[in-house]
Image (tube, rainbow, N blue to C red):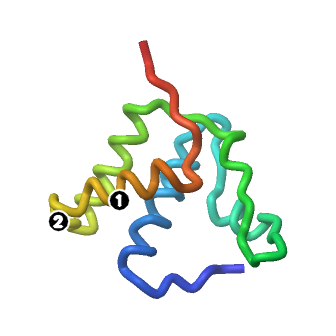
Amino acid sequence: MVLELKTKEAKIEYEIYRRLFAASTPPGDFDELVANATIDEKGQRHIPFMDYEISHNDMDAIIDAVMKEYKVKKSMRGVYKTRVYLGCSPKSKVEK
């Protein structure tokens, strides 16, 4: 199953999630996670994102790279980061 991504914003966020899960421990395929997600009575998908972990630095680098590729205005980059951090991204760890 493939979700129909109608807006540029949705495509950017989805690409960020794909790369975050591919770089996480254990590596994950975001497309598979979405396809296999359980759906509750409200129609919301539940993805086991807390089963995956990525370093905070790697997470920021991936988000920044995708936003640069899609030419997201600098004034909007904070909005994307916040939406990804609060969304279904892998949990992040701060490296010492």
According to the image, label 2 marks what residue? 73
Residue 32 vs residue 9, the one in the foreground: 9
Q: Secondary structure at mark 2?
A: loop
Classify residue 69 as left or right of residue 6.
Answer: left
According to the image, label 1 marks what residue? 80
Classify residue 1 as left or right of residue 72.
Answer: right
Residue at position x 35%, y 41% from top? 60
- Name above or below for residue 61 compared with residue 69: above
Quadrant containing the N terminus in the rendered view: bottom right
Packing grade of label 2 (10 A; few <14, some 14-19, many >=20) is few
Q: Estimate the x, y position of residue 69 in percent, counting from the top left.
A: 26, 63
Q: Estimate the x, y position of residue 57 in percent, counting from the top left.
A: 37, 32
Residue at the left extreme of this rendering: 74
Q: Amino acid at mark 2?
A: Lys
Q: Estimate the x, y position of residue 6 in percent, counting from the top left.
A: 47, 87
Q: Amino acid at mark 1?
A: Tyr
Specify the quadrant of the image occupied by residue 33: bottom right
Asked if the residues shown at circle 2 and circle 1 are in contact, with their CB atoms under 8 angstroms apart, the answer is: no
Residue at position x 82%, y 65% from top? 38
Residue at position x 16%, y 61% from top? 75
